[in-house]
């Protein structure tokens, strides 16, 4: 068990070096380097299918890299056993792309779930914590709804409340803005920033929404083709001269970033009648 | 011809591999059991879910199976002029054989599929990953209570099935066919021994472990898509049914 304070005083909470990961014979990352500063909001952007979700799974130890090193809070994820990994995860919160709320519990119990599993707090205290977190995402009134009664955006906000209920040190958001209306989007954006500043949380946000994320992120990584295409302050990425970066940040269809999944020659495949 | 042999060999190897996986999974479940029993509330909730889900179908089927036994048994015994033994025949048939087996088959079809699809859906919607991310072991929190719930519910259901079945046989034999009520019950009481009942209990416990383990295994390891969840439920019924009948033969042979 890591003792608080025995860790190296490192400004990097997450450090990825030379990461290689392949799935189904396709290399998703070849040699990825990435740093997340303590207390910062770091954005990870990139076209669909570049492996952003996969990268988060590698950082949280749900997947193990083929090569390279992934260090979180001074501990190398690959070397942690099950116990160490669970101890590390208790210091992280993660917002899944689709919310991933537990379908047999209502909203209140979903948010209370980590508290009930990991603490022995008295019921009134749990109630206060849960209601505070639900209030923060604007869903205190929905406490007794079942998960199937929620819209996609509401489910995401409940999941956010659940992710912060244990006051984690690291918060990981996978596509937090998809399916949110402009008002909730504004609230979530502000929440990301506020949580970060008020509680000193380190945030990693995966998103395609260049404009939204540029507004809150301290640093942004643009992934493309299994490597970091560009990194830096969002504003500097927006002004980048590199064709690849410009294409993504400005949403242009043509450019160095391929829109298509790797495929054989189009004409040949249509005319030749080869295998699909 | 060679093709057929190769397919057969592959089929046999696949079944053995699957059996090995089940064995490993059950070993893990059994190892977790003492710990899971500490969170008794979760188990009770699942006993209620699995048990209550299957109760109506178990009671109805028990009644009808008992009534059929009453008719067939009466027809058979009448030829030997010993209709009074109907109670004994029905009770032995139900307690030793039909109760555990039919209840297990129904349990697999009703509660087993519900378990498998529930777990499969949890996998498909990232709920299990979300739990792992919250540092909660899904095997401990989700799989174990469901497994134990099934293990506890199954013998209870088999008992209820047998009781209602005997009532059904009595309904047909005594009320309709006119077998003497006193004879029906007293012969049953005299002939059915503790060992017969134990045989039924042992069988239903074993079937409970097998059916619940298969259901949670298939659900927990299902491919995370709608199709994968569907396949997991189908496999649950098919594999459970075959396993129940196979185990039934083996247990009967051992306990003869
Ligand atoms: N289980 C798997 N088997 C095979 N390939 C996979 C698997 N999971 C992911 N992939 C591949 O890995 C690549 C990256 O997937 P990932 O989900 O990380 O993308 P993403 O960047 O999060 O995309 P999106 O923005 O659409 O969510 C995809 O091209 C996908 O085809
Ligand atoms: Mg993704």
Image: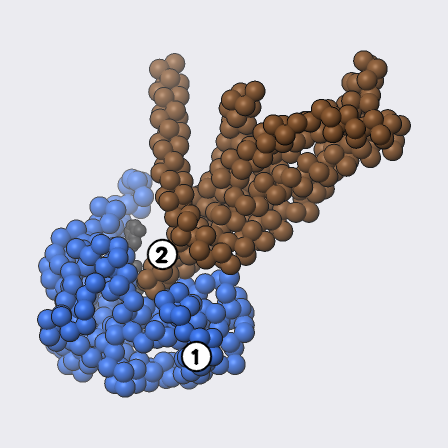
Q: Which residue is mark 1?
A: A125
Callout 1: SS: helix
Where residue B2 sits in the image (x, y, percent)?
35, 15
A67 and A238: which one is in front? A67
The chain under label 2 reads B
Left or right of B135 on screen, residue B214? right
A116 and A39: which one is in front? A116
A20 and B131: which one is in front? B131
Q: Give the chain letter for brown.
A: B
Where residue A59 sits in the image (x, y, percent)?
22, 62
The residue under the point 45% across, 68% down is A110
Residue A237 visible at all: no
Where residue A113 sits in the image (x, y, percent)?
42, 67
The chain under label 1 reads A
Q: Which residue is mark 2?
A: B137
The C terminus of chain A sits in image quarter = top left
Q: Give the chain letter for blue.
A: A
The residue under the point 66% across, 47% down is B55
Callout 2: SS: loop
B5 and B121: which one is in front? B121
């Amino acid at each position: 068990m890591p003792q608080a304070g025995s860790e190296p005083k490192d400004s990097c909470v997450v450090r990825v070096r030379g990461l290689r990961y392949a799935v189904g014979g396709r290399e998703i990352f070849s040699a990825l380097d990435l740093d997340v500063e303590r207390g910062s909001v770091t954005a990870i952007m990139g076209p669909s299918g570049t492996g952003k979700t996969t990268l988060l799974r590698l950082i949280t130890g749900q997947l193990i890299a083929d090569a390279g090193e992934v260090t979180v809070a001074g501990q190398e994820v690959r070397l942690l056993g099950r116990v160490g990994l669970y101890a590390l995860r208790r210091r992280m919160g993660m917002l899944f792309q689709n919310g991933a709320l537990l379908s047999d519990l209502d909203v209140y119990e979903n948010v209370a779930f980590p508290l009930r599993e990991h603490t022995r707090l008295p019921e009134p205290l749990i109630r206060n914590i849960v209601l505070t977190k639900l209030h923060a995402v604007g869903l205190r009134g929905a406490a007794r709804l079942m998960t199937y009664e929620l819209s996609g955006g509401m489910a995401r906000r409940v999941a956010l409340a659940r992710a912060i209920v244990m006051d984690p040190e690291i918060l990981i958001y996978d596509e937090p803005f998809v399916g949110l209306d402009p008002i909730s989007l504004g609230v979530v954006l502000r929440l990301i920033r506020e949580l970060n500043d008020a509680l000193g949380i380190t945030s990693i946000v995966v998103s395609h929404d260049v404009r939204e994320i540029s507004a809150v992120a301290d640093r942004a990584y643009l992934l493309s083709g299994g490597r970091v295409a560009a990194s830096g302050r969002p504003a500097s990425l927006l002004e980048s001269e590199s064709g690849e970066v410009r294409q993504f940040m400005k949403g242009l269809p043509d450019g160095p970033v391929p829109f298509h999944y790797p495929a054989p020659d189009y004409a040949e495949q249509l005319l030749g009648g080869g295998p699909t | 011809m060679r093709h057929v042999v190769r397919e057969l060999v592959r089929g046999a190897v696949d079944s053995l591999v699957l059996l090995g996986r089940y064995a490993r999974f059950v070993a893990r479940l059994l190892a977790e059991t003492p710990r899971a029993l500490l969170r008794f509330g979760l188990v009770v909730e699942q006993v209620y879910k699995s048990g209550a889900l299957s109760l109506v179908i178990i009671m109805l089927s028990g009644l009808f199976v008992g009534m059929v036994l009453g008719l067939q048994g009466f027809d058979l015994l009448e030829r030997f002029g010993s209709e009074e033994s109907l109670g004994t025949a029905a009770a032995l048939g139900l307690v030793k054989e039909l109760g555990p087996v039919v209840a297990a088959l129904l349990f697999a079809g009703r509660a087993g599929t519900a378990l498998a699809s529930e777990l499969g859906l949890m996998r498909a919607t990232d709920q299990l990953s979300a739990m792992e991310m919250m540092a909660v072991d899904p095997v401990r929190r989700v799989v174990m209570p469901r497994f134990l719930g099934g293990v506890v519910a199954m013998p209870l259901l088999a008992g209820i099935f047998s009781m209602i079945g005997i009532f059904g046989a009595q309904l047909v034999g005594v009320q309709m066919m006119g077998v003497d009520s006193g004879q029906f019950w007293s012969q049953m009481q005299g002939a059915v021994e503790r060992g017969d009942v134990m045989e039924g209990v042992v069988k239903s416990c074993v079937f409970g472990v097998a059916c619940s383990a298969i259901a949670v295994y298939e659900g927990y390891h299902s491919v995370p898509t709608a199709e994968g969840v569907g396949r997991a439920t189908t496999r649950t019924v098919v594999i459970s049914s075959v396993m129940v009948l196979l185990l039934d033969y083996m247990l009967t042979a051992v306990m003869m």
